[in-house]
């Protein structure tokens, strides 16, 4: 974590940054609210791959990632108009993630600034991003290596309250069988009909309310109705207490999610004096 990040980093050089980002995000989401999940996912994956340095934005992704990146580039252009060569893509992504969650009814949190952009991405770093097939033990280890607790793991997994997943991300649960998987049979049957082996790119909602940030994700977990194997693993003994807590109280989840996002946003960022400010994300 860096001591150079600050909430007032752009107070003099780009004081209207939050308002600019919020305006563009709200405008973009008026047509396509599902893009919020793409932006949140980009921020999460960026922070987990190399630390929050904007390097993931240089990596080619699927169509949904491309849609999120397009919005981030639109935000960047608006910021450049008011504050040229001042605000990093990494900071724009961090702030856009918060505004995306707020736009869909989720919590706010304090975003600190001062990150700089990596000039390049490292393909090997992508392997550090948690996959949807990890066990509870593997998930805990992945988060703990980054200074994030079990509570942070469960709370941040609640980001799956919004968005969709490709059938290929969970098809192994449906047709190959996964040891220790407790997926609800009726739910599994519905997924099999929606996700035949011939349609790996088809999309399915991650929870019952994919365009509203809420705690229904955790309620679905307790009913054994989660898409991803890694999500269902949150019902293991070390983690299920947090799932029950968040399912019972949405505000408790919101507070834990906000705290987790603050901690994650400080993961090994490149700060002032290092890195660069890219003109395009």
Image (cartoon, rainbow, N blue to C red):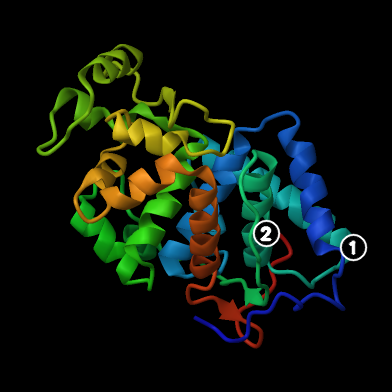
Whole-percent x, y for residue 132 in the image: 30, 44
Asked if residue 127 is positioned above or below residue 7 in the image, the reply reads: above
Q: On the rendered image, what quadrant is the C terminus found in?
A: bottom right
Residue appearing at x 42%, y 33% in the figure: 165
Which quadrant would residue 79 be assigned to in this image?
bottom right
* Secondary structure state at the residue bearing disc 1: helix
Q: Which residue is mark 1?
A: 82
Is 125 in front, or is 141? Answer: 141
Which quadrant would residue 222 be assigned to in this image?
top left
Q: CA distance from mark 1 to mark 2?
A: 16 Å
Residue appearing at x 61%, y 41% in the figure: 36
Q: Is residue 10 left or right of residue 154?
A: right
Q: Which residue is mark 2?
A: 95
Within 10 angstroms of label 2, few (less than 14), some, or many (20 or more) residues? many
Which numbered disc covers residue 42? Answer: none
Residue positioned most to the right: 82
Whole-percent x, y for residue 126 in the image: 38, 59
Q: Could you tell me how many numbered marks the image carries? A: 2
Residue appearing at x 40%, y 26% in the figure: 201
Note whether residue 119 is visible: yes
Residue appearing at x 50%, y 69% in the figure: 263
């Amino acid at each position: 974590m860096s001591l150079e990040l600050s909430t007032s980093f752009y107070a003099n050089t780009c004081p209207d940054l939050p308002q600019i980002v919020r305006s563009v995000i709200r405008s973009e989401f008026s047509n396509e609210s599902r893009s919020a999940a793409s932006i949140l996912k980009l921020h999460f994956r960026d922070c987990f791959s190399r630390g929050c340095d904007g390097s993931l934005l240089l990596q080619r992704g699927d169509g949904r990632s491309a849609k999120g990146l397009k919005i981030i580039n639109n935000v960047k252009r608006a910021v450049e108009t008011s504050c040229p060569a001042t605000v990093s893509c990494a900071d724009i992504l961090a702030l856009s993630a918060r505004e995306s969650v707020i736009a869909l009814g989720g919590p706010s949190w304090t975003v600190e600034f001062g990150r700089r952009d990596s000039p390049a991405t490292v393909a090997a770093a992508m392997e550090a991003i948690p996959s949807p097939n990890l066990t509870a033990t593997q998930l805990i280890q992945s988060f703990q290596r980054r200074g994030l607790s079990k509570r942070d793991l469960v709370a941040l997994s609640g980001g799956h309250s919004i968005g969709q997943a490709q059938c290929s991300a969970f098809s192994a649960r449906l047709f190959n069988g996964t040891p220790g998987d407790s997926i609800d049979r009726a739910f599994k049957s519905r997924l099999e009909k929606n996700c035949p082996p011939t349609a790996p790119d088809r999309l399915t909602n991650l929870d019952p309310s994919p365009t509203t940030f809420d705690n229904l994700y955790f309620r679905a977990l307790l009913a054994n109705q989660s898409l991803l194997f890694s999500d269902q693993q949150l019902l293991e003994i070390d983690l299920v207490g947090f799932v029950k807590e968040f399912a019972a109280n949405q505000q408790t989840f919101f507070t834990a999610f906000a705290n987790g996002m603050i901690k994650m946003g400080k993961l090994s960022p490149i700060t002032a004096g290092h890195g660069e400010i890219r003109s395009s994300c």
